[in-house]
Image: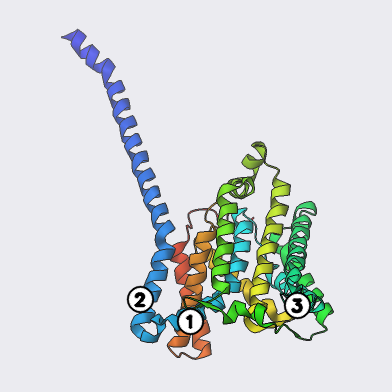
Amino acid sequence: MTGMAGERAVHAPGAVAAAAAGTAARGRDTASARMLRARSISRWAPVAVLIGLVVVFSLVNGNFMRLSNFARMSIVATPPLMVAVGATFVILMGSVDLSMEGTVATTAVVFAYTFLRLGGTLAGGGWLAIPAAMLAGVTLGLVNGLVHVKLRIPSFMASLSMGFVGMGLSMLMTGGDRVRVEDPAFRALLTERILGFPLMVPLAILALLVAWFIQRNTILGRNFYAIGGGEDLAHASGVNVARVRVLGFGLAGAFYTLAAIFAVGRIGIAETATGSNLMFVSITSVVVGGTSLMGGVGGVWNTLVGVLIVNVISNGMIVMGLPRYVQDGMMGLLVIIAVVLATDRTAKAIVK
């Protein structure tokens, strides 16, 4: 009897420890399951927000669902989408680019002047203005990245400064005047329709697919995620962090140039104000779409959803006939709600 009691006494602590270990393991499994559910909800929340907004505005005003209204929204959304796609690559690295308004203004003016100098028509050599403007946009982006990396200036401050430089360059080139581009072949971006939508819309979708390919299937795109997920770890894995950051800003400049060309195609004018208000719309769209400001999470499809959310909110307010000041207030409120629902806020709140 004494031996059996001793045996039970010896084995009891082991049993207790095993039970405790099992409980801890089940707790970890439960926490992991909750985390996976939270990430799944966060991933699909932007789409749910978009669908909800469309349903609400459709019930309030039946004109919202008309094809003509969707076409108008697509025209307004195309330049911001290109800007937001470019900004997405930078934000995936955990940085922020605020140079878009200056870059769009400069590249729009470069495109317009080059287009006119080469004959003022696409058929007459004006198409060469596209690579010329693209070169200017990529150059501004690379300089932006070099200032950030080489001078060790925070990305938001370096890019904001470069944005002012771009605005100054556009003002210097135009003297404050407007440059008109009236070639019918170029304006076909707006006037030519495919299934009711202007030509610029399918071209923007094509550019979005190119961006997705870069993000998903290239070493550069994968490195954006690696740096955003942890710069030190990416560096230890052999990633040239400085070079990837500079290239990311250069790639963003290329998409800002596409936005400038679409903007000129939409209104037929290039000026210093061509890029106005694109900073708020683009950064808001990226965040609302679910791309983390800390980097490493999100992508261009998230950005597309974010752009649609912002434009649906704006257009819905107009269709409802609300005064401008009410539109501005509701836009801010609804954007905050969308960010709360669509953004994973369990990560750190500091932007690199």
Are discs 3 and 2 less than 8 Å apart at CB?
A: no
Outermost front residue: 123
Q: Quadrant of the C terminus?
A: bottom right
Q: Quick one: label 3 or label 2, which is nearer the N terminus?
A: 2
**Residue 276 in sight:** no
| Foreground of the two, 228 or 10 | 228
Residue at horizontal 70 percent and vertical 81 percent from the top: 273
Whole-angstrom CA distance, mark 3 to mark 1, is 29 Å
Residue at horizontal 57 percent and vertical 53 percent from the top: 213
Task: Report whether 313 appears left or right of 78.
Answer: left
Whole-angstrom CA distance, mark 3 to mark 2, is 40 Å
Q: Secondary structure at mark 1?
A: helix
Task: Report whether 91 appears left or right of 37.
Answer: right
Q: Label 3, on which residue? A: 112
The numbered dot on residue 315 is: 1
Percent of width and height locating residue 291: 53, 59
Mark 1 residue crowding within 10 angstroms, few (<14) / some (14–19) / many (20+): many
Q: Quick one: label 3 or label 1, which is nearer the N terminus?
A: 3
Residue at horizontal 35 percent and vertical 45 percent from the top: 33
- Type of amino acid at the residue the image marks with label 1: Asn
Q: Label 2, on which residue? A: 55
Percent of width and height locating residue 342: 45, 63
Mark 2 residue crowding within 10 angstroms, few (<14) / some (14–19) / many (20+): few
Whole-angstrom CA distance, mark 2 to mark 1, is 13 Å
Foreground tag (3 vs 1): 3
- Type of amino acid at the residue the image marks with label 2: Val
Foreground tag (3 vs 2): 3
Residue 100 location, quadrant? bottom right
| Foreground of the two, 201 or 341 | 201
Percent of width and height locating residue 145: 74, 57
